[in-house]
Amino acid sequence: LGRAYETLKDQSKRQAYDLIYPSLRSPSHQTTQKPRPPSASTPRPEAPNEAAQIAALQRSKQERDARWRIKKNAFDSSIFELQRGIRQLEQKIKNLDSIFDAEAAIEAQKNSWTTWLLSSITKKAEETEEEKERKDRGRQERRVEKDMKERRLVLKQAELKREEDRLGTAKEEIDAADWSEEEKIRVIQARIRTRETRERQEREKAERERMANIWKQQKEQQEKREREAAEALRKQQAENRAAEQKRQEEETRKWQKFFNDQSRNYREQNTHPNLPKGSTGQAYTSTCRHGGWWSKVQGRTACPRCDDIWTYLLQCPGCEMEACPKCQAAIRPRMNRRAP
């Protein structure tokens, strides 16, 4: 009953007993008793959450620490009393040894040559038999007392050793229980951290996917808007180019008609009907005023007047003389250009 009470009182022993309890049950009892299936109406008790488990382990550790402080105080008090008794016994044995040493010194002095030589001079009174017996009896009692104290000292030292061993064993059990519960707490905390990390990663992944979808939608919308804007711009530019081309063609036709009319009028005005037959174009060229619109003659060639190489030359509408733009500016008369 005492061992059972100690097992129930000490939580570490109770936990160890709970671990080995299933193996202590009889096989017949295990085979005869059939497990009941859980009822559908009765809800199964849910396991406590991890925070409650950590709180329970920490509370158990605190309770064990409180019991350990009480037990340690009891051990410390017992060890202190034993150490004090040992110190007292050692002091008493030391006092007895001092008395023995003093008696031995006195006895040695009595048996020395000096005392024997001076005995005829000093003539001290000799001890009686009763005094000798009393001293012998005192020495015997002190020897017995010393022997008993030495035995008590050995017993107290052995008891002190046992108490210290019990204290060390209890401390090891407490440390082992603390380490076990701390390891359980660390495992639970690691499981919590792992779950939180996994949940955080899942949230971050979901957030990244959501942001990626939003960004993809925004990008598609932006690309759609850009395509629509580009298409509208291309249409507008095409329309503007068509309108500009049409305007330029119309302007070109107007200017061409104007210059053709000017050239025709110029040729009619500068035609010499009395020019003799067989005259060369040089004579006609010398009489041409080189007015009107000079048309371009494409092709890389040298100017007949300055011999510079040009990619095109200009041709006079009256005498059909070719010249580069520089020479044309020098030989062509200045005139006011006005649109019709």
Image (tube, grey):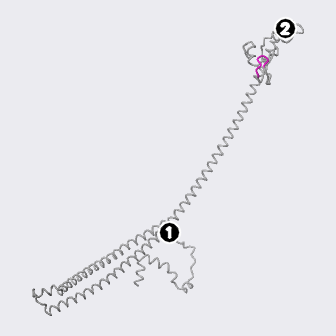
Residue for badge 1: 48
Residue 53 lies in the magenta stretch: no
Quick one: 313 or 57, which is closer to the camera?
A: 313
Check disc 2 and give the amino acid type: His
Kindly tell me whether residue 340 is visible in this rendering: no
Q: Quadrant of residue 287?
A: top right
Structural crowding at the residue carrying mark 2, measured as other residues with C-alpha within 10 Å and reported as few (<14), some (14–19) or many (≥20): few
Q: Nearer the viewer, residue 238 or 266?
A: 266
To which quarter of the image does residue 336 belong? Answer: top right
Q: Give how far across and how far down residue 334 sits, in percent.
A: 73, 13
Whether residue 70 sits left or right of residue 95 in the image: it is right
SS under mark 2:
loop
Q: Nearer the viewer, mark 1 or mark 2?
A: 2
- Give the crowd class for mark 1: few <14, some 14-19, many >=20 residues within 10 Å: few
The N terminus, quarter of image = bottom left
Q: Which residue position holds label 2?
A: 272
What residue is drawn where x is 79% and y is 21%? 302
Residue 164 tag number = none
Q: Is residue 304 magenta?
A: yes
Left or right, residue 229 beside residue 20:
right
Instruction: Say which quadrant the C terminus sits in.
Output: top right
Dominant SS type (magenta): loop
Is residue 217 found left or right of 256 in the rendered image?
A: left
Which amino acid lies under the numbered mark 1 shown in the image of this protein? Pro
